[in-house]
Image (cartoon, rainbow, N blue to C red):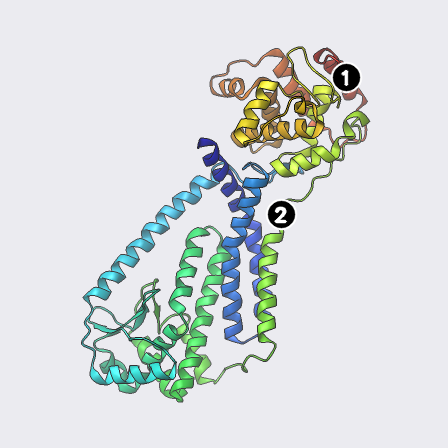
C-alpha cells in the first residue's frame, strides 16, 4: 500500500510540474484558435475544449510517469532537474483543500438560498417564462422562485436548474425588462451552461496554480454571455429592450454567486457596447464543425505531446565500447523509469566495465552488479517473477538497477544536480539507510561508498568532455578489484 501511495504521489508531482509548460502550450493553441474566428459560439466551444484538455493532459502525464517511470521524478538533463519537486504535491493538496472548502461553502449557501426562496412567482412572470421556454425548446417543468435576498436573477443547479429572481425585479427594470432577463436566464438553461460552469470550477480547483487556466476560464465566461445574449435577442426580437434591461440591471449590480450563471455575468459593459453597436459576427459557416473538431484535436494534442517522455541519447565521448554497446538498454531503462541514461552508463562503467558476466565476491551480478537479494525485493515490489539466471540478462539487470536508482531519486532530491548525483551514487552503493543516517546525523559513509560517490560525481560532471584519459585510467584501476570474472 505504501509503495502505491508513493508511486501515485510521485506521478502526480511530476504531472503537475510538467503542466507548467503544458498549460502554456494549451493556452497558446487556444489563443490561436480565438484569432481564427470572431464567432462567440466557436470561441466558446474552443475554450471548453481547452479546459477539458487540461486535466486530461495532467492525467495522461501522471499515467506515463506512474506506469512508465515507476512513479519517479524525471531524469536530470542539461544540469537541471526536470521532474516535479517532492514538495509540489503537498502544496497542491493544500490548495485543493482551501478551494474545496471555499466551493463547498458557496454551494451550501446557494442551497440554503434556494430552499428559502418562494415558489409564489407573479403570474405574468410565470406565463412569460413558459412562453419563452417554449421558444427555446426547454422541456420539463420550469423551477421558478423569487427571493428578497438577491439583487439580480441567476440560474443555479447542475442537474435540475432553478431560476431565482429578485422579488423587486419588475420595479427596477419594468415588465419588458423582466421578460428580457427571463429570456437570458432561460437561454442559460437551454444551453446547459450550469454544467459547463461546474466544469470550469472543477478545472480551476484542480489546476489553481496555473494562470492560463484562469485566463481561459474567464474567456469562456465572457463568450458564454455573448452566446446567451445572441440567443435571448433572437427570441425577443428587440435588441434595444434587451440592452436597456441589462443597463438597468447594472445600476443595481452586486457581486453574484460564483457557482451560478447570471445576467450580469462576464464583462457587462462590453456586452452592452456589443449590443448597442450591433456588433454581432456572421453565423458559423458550414465548415464550423470541422474547425471546432480540428481545434479541439490541436488543443489536446498540444498539451499531450509534451507529456510523452523523449528518448535520451547517451553522448559520452570517452565511454569505452565495452559499456557503450549497452547504450540502447540504458536509454530504454532511463525513459521507462525516469532516470538519467548517462548516469546509468557511468555507474555501469564503475560497477563492471560493461561485463554482463561479472560477479563480485559478494555475489552482485551483471552489468550493474545487482545483488540477488536486492533483485528479489525489487521484483516482489513490481509484481515480477525472476527466473533462475535472469539477473545476468543485460536488459533485466539494467532495468532492475534503473528502478532501484529511481526509487532513490524520489527520496534524495537536491536543487543541485551534482549533489543529487552524488547522493544517488551513495544510496546505490551503500544503501539508502546508510545515506539517510549520513544526512540526518552525520554518520560517516563507508570508505568504498565515499570513494564511489566522488567518482560518479566527477565522471558525470565530465561527461561532455572530449577526452578524460586520466579519469578513465583511474576508473579502470578502481574497478579491477571489485569484480571477479566468470567464464
Q: Quadrant of residue 276?
A: bottom left
Which residue corresponds to the image point at 71% horizontal and 33% vertical from the top-left?
Answer: 329
Where is the C terminus found, in terms of image quarters?
top right
Where is the N terminus found, in terms of image quarters?
top left
Q: Residues within 10 Å of mark 2 (few under 14, many from 20)?
A: few
Answer left or right for 353 relative to 384. Answer: right
Q: Quadrant of residue 430?
A: top right
Task: Point out the frontmost of discs 1 and 2.
Answer: 2
Quick check: 355 above or below 290? above
Q: Which mark is residue 308?
A: 2
Q: Please provide percent x and percent y for residue 152.
A: 29, 73
Is residue 282 visible in the rendered image? The answer is yes
Which residue corresponds to the image point at 39% horizontal and 48% vertical from the top-left?
Answer: 96
Q: Please provide percent x and percent y for residue 452.
A: 65, 18
Q: Please provide percent x and percent y for residue 306.
A: 62, 50
User: Which secondary structure, mark 1?
Assistant: helix
Q: Please provide percent x and percent y for residue 479.
A: 73, 15
Q: Which mark is residue 166?
A: none
Query: Badges 1 and 2: C-beta atoms under 8 Å apart?
Result: no
Is residue 80 visible in the rendered image? The answer is no
Q: Residues within 10 Å of mark 1 (few under 14, many from 20)?
A: some
User: Which secondary structure, mark 2?
Assistant: loop
Q: Earlier in the sequence, mark 1 or mark 2?
A: 2
Residue 277 vs residue 341, the one in the foreground: 341
- How far, Cα to Cα, is label 1 from label 2? 37 Å
Q: Which mark is residue 476?
A: 1
Which residue corresponds to the image point at 59% horizontal and 21% vertical from the top-left?
Answer: 426
Amino acid at each position: 500500500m505504501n509503495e502505491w501511495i508513493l508511486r501515485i504521489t510521485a506521478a502526480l508531482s511530476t504531472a503537475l510540474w510538467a503542466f507548467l509548460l503544458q498549460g502554456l502550450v494549451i493556452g497558446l493553441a487556444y489563443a490561436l484558435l480565438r484569432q481564427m474566428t470572431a464567432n462567440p459560439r466557436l470561441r466558446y466551444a474552443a475554450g471548453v475544449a481547452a479546459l477539458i484538455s487540461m486535466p486530461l493532459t495532467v492525467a495522461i502525464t501522471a499515467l506515463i510517469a506512474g506506469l512508465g517511470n515507476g512513479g519517479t521524478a524525471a531524469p536530470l538533463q542539461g544540469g537541471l532537474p526536470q521532474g516535479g519537486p517532492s514538495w509540489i504535491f503537498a502544496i497542491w493538496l493544500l490548495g485543493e483543500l482551501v478551494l474545496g472548502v471555499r466551493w463547498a461553502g458557496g454551494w451550501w449557501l446557494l442551497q440554503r438560498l434556494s430552499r428559502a426562496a418562494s415558489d409564489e412567482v407573479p403570474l405574468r412572470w410565470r406565463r412569460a417564462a413558459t412562453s419563452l421556454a417554449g421558444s427555446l425548446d426547454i422541456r420539463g417543468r420550469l423551477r421558478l422562485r423569487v427571493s428578497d435576498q438577491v439583487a439580480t436573477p441567476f440560474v443555479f443547479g447542475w442537474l435540475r436548474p432553478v431560476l431565482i429572481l429578485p422579488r423587486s425585479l419588475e420595479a427596477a427594470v419594468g415588465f419588458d425588462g423582466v421578460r428580457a432577463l427571463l429570456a437570458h436566464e432561460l437561454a442559460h438553461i437551454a444551453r446547459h451552461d450550469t454544467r459547463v460552469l461546474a466544469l470550469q470550477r472543477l478545472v480551476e480547483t484542480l489546476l489553481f496554480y496555473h494562470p492560463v487556466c484562469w485566463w481561459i476560464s474567464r474567456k469562456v465566461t465572457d463568450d458564454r454571455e455573448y452566446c446567451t445574449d445572441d440567443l435571448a435577442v433572437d427570441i425577443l426580437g428587440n435588441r434595444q429592450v434587451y440592452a436597456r434591461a441589462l443597463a438597468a440591471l447594472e445600476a443595481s449590480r452586486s457581486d453574484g454567486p460564483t457557482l451560478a450563471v447570471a445576467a450580469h455575468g462576464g464583462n457587462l459593459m462590453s456586452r452592452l457596447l456589443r449590443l448597442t453597436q450591433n456588433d454581432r459576427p456572421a453565423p458559423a459557416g458550414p465548415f464550423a464543425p470541422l474547425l471546432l473538431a480540428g481545434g479541439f484535436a490541436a488543443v489536446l494534442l498540444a498539451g499531450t505531446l509534451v507529456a510523452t517522455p523523449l528518448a535520451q541519447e547517451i553522448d559520452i565521448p570517452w565511454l569505452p565500447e565495452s559499456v557503450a554497446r549497452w547504450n540502447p538498454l540504458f536509454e530504454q531503462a532511463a525513459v521507462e523509469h525516469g532516470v538519467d541514461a548517462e548516469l546509468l552508463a557511468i555507474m555501469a562503467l564503475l560497477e563492471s566495465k560493461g561485463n554482463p558476466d561479472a560477479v563480485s565476491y559478494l555475489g552482485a551480478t551483471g552489468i550493474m552488479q545487482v545483488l540477488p537479494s536486492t533483485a528479489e525485493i525489487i521484483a516482489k515490489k513490481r509484481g515480477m517473477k525472476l527466473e533462475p539466471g535472469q539477473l545476468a540478462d543485460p536488459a533485466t539487470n539494467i532495468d532492475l538497477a534503473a528502478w532501484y536508482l529511481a526509487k532513490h531519486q524520489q527520496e534524495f532530491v537536491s536543487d543541485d544536480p551534482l549533489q543529487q548525483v552524488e547522493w544517488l551514487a551513495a544510496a546505490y552503493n551503500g544503501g539508502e539507510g546508510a545515506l539517510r543516517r549520513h544526512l540526518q546525523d552525520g554518520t560517516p559513509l563507508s570508505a568504498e561508498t565515499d570513494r564511489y560517490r566522488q567518482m560518479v560525481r566527477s565522471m558525470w560532471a565530465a561527461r561532455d568532455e572530449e577526452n578524460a584519459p586520466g579519469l578513465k585510467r583511474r576508473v579502470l584501476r578502481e574497478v579491477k578489484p571489485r569484480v571477479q570474472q566468470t567464464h
